Image (cartoon, grey):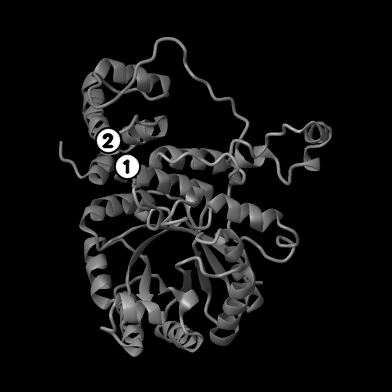
Amino acid sequence: MPKIHIVDVTNRDGVQTANLGLAKLEKTMLNIMLAQFGVFQNEFGFPTTSHEVGYLNANLELAQIGVMGHTRMEGWMRALPDDVVKSKGAVPGLEHINLSASTSDQMIDHKFKGKKSKQEIIDDAVAAVKVARDMGIKSVGVNSEDASRTDKKYLLQFAQAAKDSGADRLRYCDTLGYENPFSIYRTIREIAETVGIPIELHCHGDLGMAVACSLAGAQGAIDGGVDTYINTTVNAIGERAGNADLVSVILGARYSKGFADKYELAEGLDLTKAWKLANYVSKAFNVPIPINQAGVGMNCFAHASGIHADGVLKDPYNYELYGYEELGRGEPVNHETGRIICSGQYGGVAGFIHIMKNLGVEFNDKEEAQTILNIVRYANLSINKPISDEELIFVCKYPEITKNILAIEL
């Protein structure tokens, strides 16, 4: 039976959100947390973008020593042979990629002003896949941008060409959130049955249906006989109204009526990491989690009505589909009320040693502590907000890799 895999794109689509962004250290911490969560693949950046190269190579170094677990680290680029060559030259360890091409008449005629014909778009994508294979890329996805507004006959032609050229899957991009669950089910099932290529689902929330469309599309792919890959972002962070929320997709796949009985999530996803992950991303992007956010919102397990409170005290499943413990919630949040020593761009070595000792990290000598403190100062400057405990521990554990991520020389 085909299965559902999770491909998170927070560090590619999420960081493109207007007025938002992440420092490279924050992107790295997110990559580690996504790996701990157990996503199949992580679209972690842009290998054709010069300021991403050091960060990408450093994160692949972390992957090589096992920090990223079994999660595949994948780069995004245009479906052009030159982009593949440039990416592999800049990031030699890159093994997984997604190639993006615009396929709708709207994009071809009004974004690119007809500079390329439909056949030329297919030819470029096919050539890019072949170059990627020749350069040793292990997995290749081909993206149909604005697929939901693409002529069906041409979309099938594009998908078939991608498959014939050696692509592993087609990414169906509902770029404007145009689909509804019923329409996307029919379309994805038809592609699956006609072409027989595994399908990635990339849905946006412009109409508030990104999660529903992702799950309906996954049903269509599996009913059509192929594996499916749902693109997610943490806390639904993404362009305009956002993408399909990671936690909501998993909760929907596990708990929505009749879904889990027929459709299976492939990975051993660790939902107990959800609370920590969602709150880290909220802090990093400086975007509060809505109080009604599925699973991780403040009110998700709050009961004010007398009838509800009485019912949930008798049996939580009277008014809760799933338990808060499943999301890693319930640990007390402690706030020191006495003397607090902080570390930042102006912090001194004595305070730094004190902070790290409280976090279980001790240095061989003051000189080592000073060396790492210097890196912490740069990290603080790059983030421009208080450094989290997780970030401090990471810098102490991987100081040389951190220097590569921050692109500094000391």
Using the image as rendered, state which of residue 380 and residue 294 is in the foreground.
294
Other residues around mark 2 within 10 Å, as few (<14) / some (14–19) / many (≥20)? many
Residue 222's image quarter? Answer: bottom right
Pinpoint residue 336: horizontal percent, then vertical percent: 47, 16
Q: In the rendered view, does 31 fall on the left or right side of 364?
A: right
Q: In the rendered view, does 334 fall on the left or right side of 364?
A: right
Other residues around mark 1 within 10 Å, as few (<14) / some (14–19) / many (≥20)? many
In the picture shown, does residue 212 fall above or below 383? below
Q: Residue at x 30, y 45 (%)?
A: 24
Pinpoint residue 19: horizontal percent, then vertical percent: 34, 48
Residue 162's image quarter? Answer: bottom left
Label ID, residue 25: 1
In the picture shown, does residue 169 fall above or below 229? below
Pinpoint residue 120: horizontal percent, then vertical percent: 31, 87
Q: Residue at x 53, y 85 (%)?
A: 195
Pinpoint residue 100: horizontal percent, then vertical percent: 36, 72
Q: Secondary structure at mark 2?
A: helix
User: In the rendered view of the protein, which quadrant contains the N terminus?
Assistant: bottom right
Q: Does residue 169 appear anywhere in the picture?
A: no
- Dots 2 and 1: beta carbons under 8 Å? yes
Q: Among all residues in the image, which is located at the extreme left? A: 410
Label ID, residue 95: none
Q: Secondary structure at mark 1?
A: helix
Using the image as rendered, state which of residue 263 and residue 207 is in the foreground.
207
Could you tell me the amino acid type at mark 2? Ala
Label ID, residue 379: 2
Q: In the rendered view, does 328 fall on the left or right side of 306?
A: left
In the picture shown, does residue 278 fall above or below 211? above
Q: Residue at x 30, y 82 (%)?
A: 124
Could you tell me the amino acid type at mark 1? Leu
